[in-house]
Amino acid sequence: MHGGARLVGEVDVVGAKNSVLKLMAAALLAPGTTTITNCPQILDVPLMGDVLRGLGCQVDIDGDTCVIETPEELSHLADSAAMGKLRASVCVLGPLVGRLRKAKVALPGGDAIGQRPLDMHQSGLRKLGATAAIEHGCVVAEAEQLKGAQIWLDFPSVGATENILMAAVLAEGTTILDNAAREPEIVDLCTMLQQMGAKIEGAGTSTLTVHGVSSLQPTQHRVIGDRIVGATWAFAAVTTRGDITVRGVNPHHIELVLEKLRTAGAEITVEEESFRVVMPERPKAVDYVTLPFPGFATDLQPFAIALSAVSDGTAMITENVYEARFRFVEEMIRLGADARTDGHHAVVRGIERLSSAPTWASDIRAGAGLVLAGLCADGVTEVYDVFHIDRGYPGFVENLNRLGATVIRVPA
Ligand code: UD1
């Protein structure tokens, strides 16, 4: 990408990656036809389709619509090659235990952003009456009966909340899940499960109460807009001192982000499902602390670092969720950023302009963060391993070029 462009224009954001993949897993809970719309056209959606096919489902993905035919007789063995290619594949565990009372699920893959254990997924299932252990590279779980229980999570894990929830909806009796994750994607999952007949109270709060039912029905559901992609464009506007209108994302899902960007000097107006970010001058440095929702999302940390690198002043960025995410700082230093890390903290002293260099994407967000940084560097910056970006950003290069950037995708 050529540095120096000011990004100006409008961009449409489609459904959230971190929602659609869990909604596809939820289709396992009800035999029949589930239809999910507003699906993003990213690699992880067909990969999740392959995971479901491996369990006996028929999956048709056409544009932004995914139709899943779930059979009466499902396999409990999730070991297709796709399992290791994405993190969300582990979300078939809860539905399989809920419906079949047993599951053998190969350990998932996904971004290398730090340790990603499954201890809370397992202990939650154990509380519901299942056995759960890791054996020969698989999570193996089995239950004679699933009984509602009081469960406290040590940390509001997104994946553990989803798996426990999807097992509890078909357990006998009432489950109370405390310190549950509150992300909008969890609310989206609860909405779809409620449409399927599940009895869930407290969606969007840290206490989920689930009254188990004996069966669920398939449904049709529209995925919520991707708040992480929406926030990426908000950062793109501020970092390049541009003017971007983002459509298809609920601004309430990124209120804290927008407030941070206002503090950096951005002018932001919001509507129901869109917002506009205008950056009239050089951004001011702002501190960021990553936390579970409604805190500042760890997935946005690379964008906070890229922005801080060209801001006026010094910013402290604290990472509380995934320790390995600071590997991104090494790549920023290639671009001339004045940044250093110490444990959970990164200190970034802003400079006027970065300087182009070859860089390597290590995960989805780091890859997109390098592209934003490259747009603020003198000369032509190269980002390698962009297949990571494809997993999260449909049409990323096309959108950038429509907004006025000059970005070329070079086939590997
Ligand atoms: C999801 C998102 C990911 C995002 C993350 C945090 C998907 C596919 N991915 O990942 O983009 O960065 O939420 O917002 O939705 N943990 C444990 N034990 C467990 C489970 C988690 O210690 O059993 C720890 C993790 O190591 C991490 C923290 O809890 O430090 C948060 O993880 P979690 O919320 O579970 O993230 P994911 O669901 O994997």
Image (cartoon, helix red, strand yellow):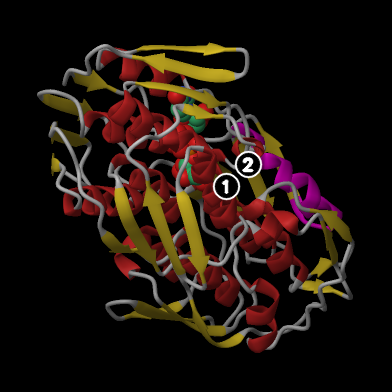
Question: Residue at position x 17%, y 49% from top?
Answer: 194
Check residue 50 in the rendering and tell me which mark sits there, or answer none: 1
Q: Could you tell me which secondary element the residue under label 2 belongs to? A: helix
Question: What whole-number distance in Å separates the C-alpha atoms at marks 1 and 2?
Answer: 6 Å
Magenta highlight: main SS: helix
Q: Can residue 201 be seen in this view?
A: no
Kind of residue sitting beneath label 2: Ala
Hey, which quadrant is residue 33 in on the image?
A: bottom left
Kind of residue sitting beneath label 1: Asp
Q: Which of 203 and 267 is in front in this view?
A: 203
Q: Percent from the top left, x then y, of residue 340?
A: 73, 42
Q: Percent from the top left, x then y, of residue 296?
A: 43, 50
Question: Residue at position x 68%, y 68% from top?
Answer: 372
- In this picture, which residue range is highlighted in magenta? 323-338
Q: Is residue 336 magenta?
A: yes
Check residue 104 in the rendering and tell me which mark sits there, or answer none: none
Residue corresponding to mark 2: 82
Question: Residue at position x 33%, y 69% from top?
Answer: 250
Asked if the residues shown at circle 1 and circle 2 are in contact, with their CB atoms under 8 angstroms apart, the answer is yes
Q: Percent from the top left, x then y, of residue 333?
A: 81, 51
Q: In this view, does 278 lie above or below 63?
A: below
